[in-house]
Amino acid sequence: MQEITQKARNIRDVIRYIKTFKNAVCVIYIDDEIINSSMLPSHIHDISLIHESGIKVVIVPGCRKRINEILSQSNIEWKIKNGQRITNPESMSLIKMAAFDVSNTIMTSLAGEKVSAVIGNWVKARGKGVIAGVDYGTTGEIESINTQQITEILNDGFIPIMPCIGWSATGKPYNISSLTLATEIAINLEADKLFFVLPDTQLNPKEFSIPKELNLTSDFNIPAMNLKEISSFIKLNKPKAVKSDSKEITKQQKILDLFSLAKDACKKGVSRVHILDGSIDGILPCEIFSSIGSGTMIYNDEYSGFRSMTLNDISSVLSLMDPFVKKGILLPRTKAGLSEKLDDYVVYSVDGAIHACAALHIYNSTQAEIAGVAVDESYSKLGIGVKLINYLINKAKAKKVKSVFVLTTQTADWFEKLGFKSDKISSLPEERKKKWTPERNSKVLRIKI
């Protein structure tokens, strides 16, 4: 029965997100290590399904590995400076060939899914020039993007594919960063979503320092970060210096660059940026059509948070509580009962769906009770339960309450970890003491605030 309930929640998520993102614009960067892997057909199939669901997709393929191969085959030297490739002007024809070769791979794969795509030249660029004595050669910076043409192509039902080449006003080509290009396209199109799909995106605590306010999953992902949290992460992790003649970018630097681009995109209007491990089959639809996702999301909107319960939330709250009632952890509630105590309840909402709830019942100036705590199992692993209790304790502090208690039969250990201590039944307010029964024999735990 519980398995069917969970399946129903997942299906409701999909239906809600299909409705939410109908005609939304989604920019997807695909790293060329993924393009050259056995995972590409699966990702292309998923992209075609996303496209068919009504989401407008733009693809920016990464070309670093392919460019490396072609330059190496031609014995052309290059180096990386500040994350950008520096080559001589003679290499530009080979870089163009590599960039369009990778784009053709994507277009051919989409054609196999009966999806029409267009490779286009919609980016104006200028040479980066000489900075601090370093001549960046063929490296370019984006000047403008022809969003009107891209929008027309999207409206006609095509998927635009954007190679990492920009052109000056006189027709001179420049090599631009694919990651930066994807970010700028998303900003210019005011995209709803920007995806970075690449391998090895895990935030291993041996390599990265994780801010204490963020929760790391067992897969080494931080499911969601707002702009304040991502700024904290970037500040805490300073990359090691890279040799000026290095041909590779370290993983730490690459992740921090991605986070900086994601932060910039969100600050400039992109609703959400997702960093995904492209070695996982099905990660794109899981990230788009579920509330918890499978990667790391950076956001700058009302994606999630605690708020007061409304009448429209009651059915969802009762459904959320139901598994805990069946296990005997919670007492049954009714729609009428929740309506009467509407102002006492808070919920944790993600994209309009309820994934946690609890009530703060204030009895007098000295005591309040936290009750009806229910957290979706998937979200309890992300520390939402702890955040919910802390939210209610802070709410009690604002009301000048001296202590907060809970009555529990099966979760005493969890509350004790949060600082609650065992107390006597006689310590309860008279109104609450009358409702306590020896048959249920709930324990009293209290925390002074």
Image (tube, rainbow, N blue to C red):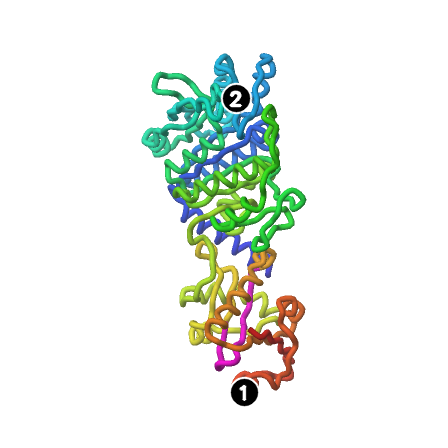
Front residue of 158 and 176: 176
* Callout 2 secondary element: strand
Residue under pointer 2: 86
Label count reads: 2
Side of 319 relative to 172 (left or right): right
- Considering every residue shown, the one lying at the far front of the view is 133
The residue that mark 1 highlights is 430
Where residue 30 sits in the image (x, y, percent)?
A: 52, 32
Find residue 273 and report its horizontal and vertical position in percent: 48, 42
Q: Where is residue 440 in the image (x, y as percent from the top left)?
A: 63, 79
Is the N terminus in the top left, top right, bottom left or bottom right quadrant?
Answer: bottom right
For the residues labelled 1 and 2, the Cα–Cα distance comes to 76 Å
Residue type at mark 2 is Ile
Count neighbours of disc 1 (C-alpha within 10 A) and say few if under 14, some if 14 to 19, many if 20 or more: few
Kind of residue indicated by mark 1: Glu
Query: Which range of residues does the magenta coloring cover?
Result: 360-376
Q: Which of marks 1 and 2 is nearer the N terminus?
A: 2
Q: Is the magenta stretch mostly helix, strand or loop?
A: strand
Residue ID at (42%, 18%)? 173
The structure residue drawn at horizontal position 40% and vertical position 17%, both measured from the top left corner, is 172
